[in-house]
Amino acid sequence: MTTDYDVLIIGSGASGGMAAHTLTKLGVSCLMLDAGPLLDFDRDKSLKAVYDLPYRGFGEPGRFPHVTQASEFDANLWADEKQNPYTYDPKDPYYWVRIRMIGGKTLRWGRASWRLSDFEFKGKDHDGQGDNWPVSLKDLSPYYDRAEPMFRVSGRKEGWPQLPDGIFLADESRDSLSVQRFLDSARKMQVPTTKQRRSTGSLASSVNLLLPDALVTGKLKIVPNAIVREISVDKDTGRANGAHFVDRLSKRDFFAPAKAVVVGASCLESTRLLLNSKSRQHPNGLANSSGVLGHYLFDQFYVKNVVTAIVPEARGGKAPRNLMGGGGYIPRFRNLADREKNFVRGYAYDFGSGGTPSAKYIPLYGEALLKELAELQNTAFSLTTMGETLPRFEHHVRINPNVKDEWGIPSLHITQRYTDNEYAMAKDSMNVAEELCKGAGFEVLSKHFEMVPPGESIHELGTCRMGANPKTSVLNGFNQTHDIRNLFVMDGSSFVSGGSQNPTLTILALSMRASEYLAEGMRKGEI
Amino acid sequence: MKRRLAIQSLLGLPGISALPMLAQQAPTDKTKPPSTEKLPPELKPAPIDEFPKLAVIRPDAVVAGETNFLSASQSETLRHLAGLLVPASGGRAGATEAGAPEFLDFLIGRSPAPRQKLYRAGLDKLEGDARHRYSKSFSSLTAAEADSLLAALHQPWSQQGPADELGRFLEAAKEDMLRATMNSREFLASGGQRRASGLGTYWHALD
């Protein structure tokens, strides 16, 4: 029954899905393992009223202490934290948010699709901070050009160096009057604004945009519920030759042989797998001769609702039909030309018009509160900050041998905290957002600069980073490990820096590029 | 006979003596299966290969939940607080009508220890303050008297949140009570507006 596959792909989300899509179209046979089940969109969902849920929409208490995104409606989609534990220092909580099923986090992502720029790829050249990537925007642009149409990204071209344009479905929607006022305010402050760039369609996931095409080639087999515990290396050749995995349901062990291995299990799961793949030849984990595997963990900090304002003309349900609704995006505008602030790098905002502000912002209760909430229905205008965090060696993950998951696999201990640079940036973003709202004639209801805990943005990046130097990085510019030629890591763990742009589009482009390199290398017999 | 009575009961039909026409249509040839062609639709048996879909209802739609987390005194305080925080208004159900205090007794009773402590300590503090200031139970206070103990709810929202434990409890209770009320069957049935009528796509547990 055992078949030799050319490539074993671990993970089926953005990176694994794109690897399967690219490799199979080039004639490479692939076996894909994913730790979770396959969702049946007909069988597994139904329409329910919130009062028919056991916890009236609050969710089961304590079930997801770190997954603030989970609602009682979709709780069964998120990885169970008891089955999949991890640890951190209680002083520095880390929110590790996971989905374990075919398609991974592309089943629930926010769909924001921004390219990185050379302000990220070559950031060190610009401001001396951190490290450059071994690739530039020019290297990755052809792959962005192909990934954007596949994911039906809508947007508006602007010609900005910090937010490169792409191949978009043109967004020519009209802005509401409140958004227009906000845009005018931003223009006066010389703050750039644009439309959102988002993947469109009723579902925008690996499961409908990548995997079906790969299956049609006849070159892909997908095994769900396959939890990989270790990547195997041939002692004689030093090459990766497959992976040991355990069936999630029966807990039966299996071995999947392959000529090459692609890891795309999501940022921290991929690194965990490499760290757990220890042997006499690789005592510190696989592909870790540099000692940096697990290090340089970062993400993007979020300040949710950094400012919530009221559009006064909308009070009491008096808004004309085109006053409220819509939104947009403000790209990074700090530290582009010169060092201009008390922090390095920058931040972006999402902004949106409409909805009712949270009752927690209204210092009333009882009848007075209910009347005020009715008065403020569909009056809100709010912004959320997404800021760049700096990768630091001391922010890292390591194996915690004392805590194992339900399948006996050692878990991760995670260390990341925000530093003065992020705090200064968050505070600046609050002040600018307040000024923008006031300039638009909005009433500021609340403002704050409290960042959500590291990890909560679900943009965890780094820990298996690329680099030109094998002594300070794990991967080369094609996501190939420096140590083992036929082992690739294609997800967000490969990032060197992240800017403030959502990372999924870049993960797709990197995976496509690396997969073509792998296929070509196999064809030439070099890998 | 039992089945016939059950059908009569379900359909609200009169007794057997009122069904002479049906009796006359009984098959005379006992070697053939009985014909159901001429039966009224409500009395036709379901097709043999059709599986039933019965309408059922959640328990809290028909009976009250038992409360067993908070003490009797704490429950009294929470019930009175519920009426103050989210009163019935404009024909819409309030927290009391929505059974929100009883639901929160259940929810908090299942919650992590810090949240349980916040509720218990907060309710005890309200009761203690009422006894100290007005020499009577919190549940006996008028709205004006209670308002003096709920001053934290008049403070503007801040990033740091309330400094004292009572303020933190009241902030949590306000939010929880509103949500428990607005997500209730009673609130929605009484015309309370809620986004998308409280409907959502529910994802079932997977194997």
Image (spheres, coloured by chain):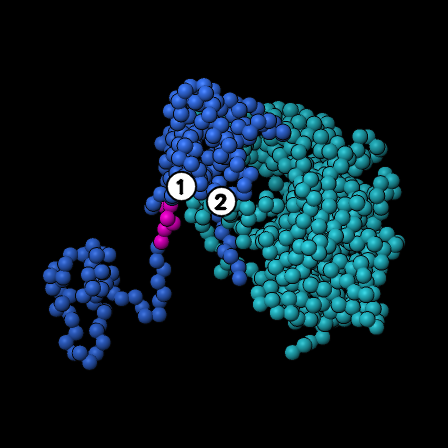
Percent coordinates x, y for residue B187 in the rendering: 40, 38
Residue drawn at 60 percent across, 52 percent down: A81
Q: Residues within 10 Å of mark 2 (few under 14, many from 20)?
A: some
* A51 displayed left or right of A490: left
The image quarter containing residue A218 is bottom right
Q: Which chain hosts label 2?
A: B
Looking at the picture, does residue B27 appear above or below residue A409?
below
Residue type of the residue flagged with mark 2: Arg
Percent coordinates x, y for residue A274 in the rendering: 75, 59
Secondary structure beneath dot 1 equals: loop
Residue positioned most to the bottom: B31
User: Label 2, on which residue?
Assistant: B110
Looking at the picture, does residue B132 appear above or below residue A126?
above
Q: In which quadrant is the N terminus of chain B drawn?
A: bottom left
Real-space CA distance between mark 2 and mark 1, rounded to the nearest whole angstrom: 12 Å
- Looking at the image, do the residues carrying marks 2 and 1 touch, with CB atoms under 8 Å apart? no
User: Label 1, on which residue?
Assistant: B67
Residue drawn at 60 percent across, 26 percent down: B163
Colour of chain B, in one word, is blue
Secondary structure beneath dot 2 equals: loop
Q: Which residues are magenta?
A: B56-61
Towards the viewer: A17 or A392: A392
- Chain drawn in cyan: A
